[in-house]
Image (spheres, helix red, strand yellow):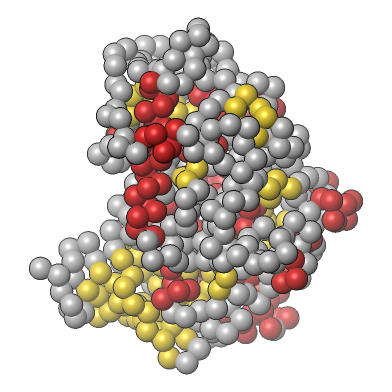
Amino acid sequence: MRTTTPTAEQHTDVLVVGGGVGGIAAALAACEGGARVVVVEPYGWIGGQLTSQAVPPDEHPWIETHGSTASYRRFRQAVRDHYRTWYPLASDGSTRPLNPGNGWVSPLCHEPRAALAVLQAMIAPWRAAGRLTVHTRAQVERAHTDGDAVTALTVRLADGTLRHLAASLVLEASETGELLALAGIEHRTGTESQAQTGEPSAPDRPAPLNMQAATVCFALDHVDGDHTVDRPADYDHWRTRTAPGWPGPLFSWTYPDPRTGRPVTGRFTPNPRSTATSMEEGLIAPELWTYRRILDRRAFRPGLFPSDVTLVNWPMNDYLDGPLFDVPDAERHVRRAREASQAFLYWLQTEAPRPDGGTGFPGLRLRPDVTGTADGFAQAPYIREARRLVAVTTPTEQDLSVVVRGAAGAVHYPDTVGTGHYRIDLHPTTGGDGYLDVAAHPFEIPLGALLPERVTNVIAAGKAVGTTHITNGCYRVHPAEWSIGEAAGALAAYCLDRQTSPHGVRASAKLLEDFQSELARRGVDLRWPTTMATAPQPAGGDALPS
């Protein structure tokens, strides 16, 4: 029986809405700073993009040494150590850093469960100390406000009971920016107009429901036998679906190059004998099987794995029929996004052209154990674009575009709290826009982008950071989201310790300098080395959209 009134109350220092990449980074930083923290996560796994959404890390070329935080690099090293400790690796004498999947989207393509294991280990000391509480499968149902502050949230826990959670500071780290809507915090969705932002690539008119496509990812291997799923009821709709700028149906090996719009024909070879292991190699002849491969059978003891495992987050299974939030039929769109990926899988198994001239790969097999679901599809849709905070500072295209900024590099922010880098990578949208792919300089993350213009005790700690529709395209990837979350959590702890407000830190030159020194002591990169600061992502950047 569902409870309609709160059965318990709890007060904490910091309340984090969302236990994804940014939310967990925020929780760790706040706990390390001495705060008591509660995290509310709607899915069964913490980790967001890394785990429940099943998206291998999208990273820039310098990620091994620069452009992130020390804690993010510790996470990455712990993932490698997890494989070295528990998996029998092939002794091939390789001197490359371990990449378990040898996928060419990233130097660290790994299973979602490996990320989950590492994240659980990272938060374990704080849970054991009673400093951190994580509620999974919990839904925020109501936000309570008092003037310009969010005072508490009513949350439905996994057992159906309601809990009233009060906090001094609230961090918005959800995948959709749900707190912004629930608390009435000023925000934007979809595309802004050029008049609003001054961005060269912005359209003439705003369109709040024109959002980047979401994707439901899924895990596959390829083994003997026929593993064809049931034909989806609406299969004919999906197999003939087209997208803006596409040379033919969405279900095809041919798709538009995101940068030039010219048709590109990829390859698909399950368990190939030799494959690209870097972005530069992969761009020569795009091989979709290895693009987001998370387990390369040849990297482990011979005979251990009968097949590689790859994750399908490709141009073909983007969902374009509508936004997954802020519309009356949002739940229908969430279901339809899943159906679109199911239909794509059926096409792969039955109709996809094979190199030998035949059609279909019936040996493709879903891997529910990889995704932690009954059917092998990700627990959560990969939502690229959330509600975006109307923030004190809004980074725009002209702040970091290579075309606009030239040799000057990205804008320097006096209140930088982190760094990031990725091309401005926008997928086709629910409103009919095609790809937008713009070269970007390595950038700094301004503290002002984490702070609402009005609300005094809320800090953006993830995808709801105050970007535009366009700059969201480079702020949304894993290391940038971690950096945003870590800065938010560290700021919350700093404010509690100094008895000041987030806006007060930014307004005071002395407090800001002190806080930035604290971030630097934590191992946060606040600025790029001069040699990298004016370097756009090389030609080896992600020519397949992420």
Of all residues shown, which one is farthest toward the top? 356
Residue 192, above or below 454: above
Q: Where is the C terminus found, in terms of image quarters? A: top right
Say whether residue 150 is visible.
Answer: yes
The quadrant where residue 23 appears? bottom left
Residue 263: image quadrant is top right
In this picture, residue 379 sits left or right of residue 539: left
Task: Please give left or right for residue 507 compared with residue 170 in the image.
Answer: right
Q: Horizontal and vertical percent for residue 147?
A: 47, 92
Please report the residue visible at 71 percent of the width from the left and 60 percent of the height from the top: 203
Name the image quarter holding the N terminus. Answer: bottom left
The one nearer the camera, 7 or 511, is 7
Q: Position of residue 223 (x, y in %)?
A: 34, 16
Foreground: 111 or 504? 111
Rendered location of residue 408, percent (x, y) = 88, 55
Q: Is residue 33 left or right of residue 106?
A: left
> Seen from this angle, which residue lies furthest bottom?
147
Residue 237 position within the rendered picture, expressed as x and y whole percent measured from the top left? 41, 38
In this view, the residue in front, 443 or 265, is 265
Residue at far right of view: 407
Residue 316 visible in rendering: no
Q: Residue at x 73, y 81 (%)?
A: 509
* Left or right side of 298 for 363: left
Q: Is residue 139 above or below residue 332?
A: below
Image mark count: 0
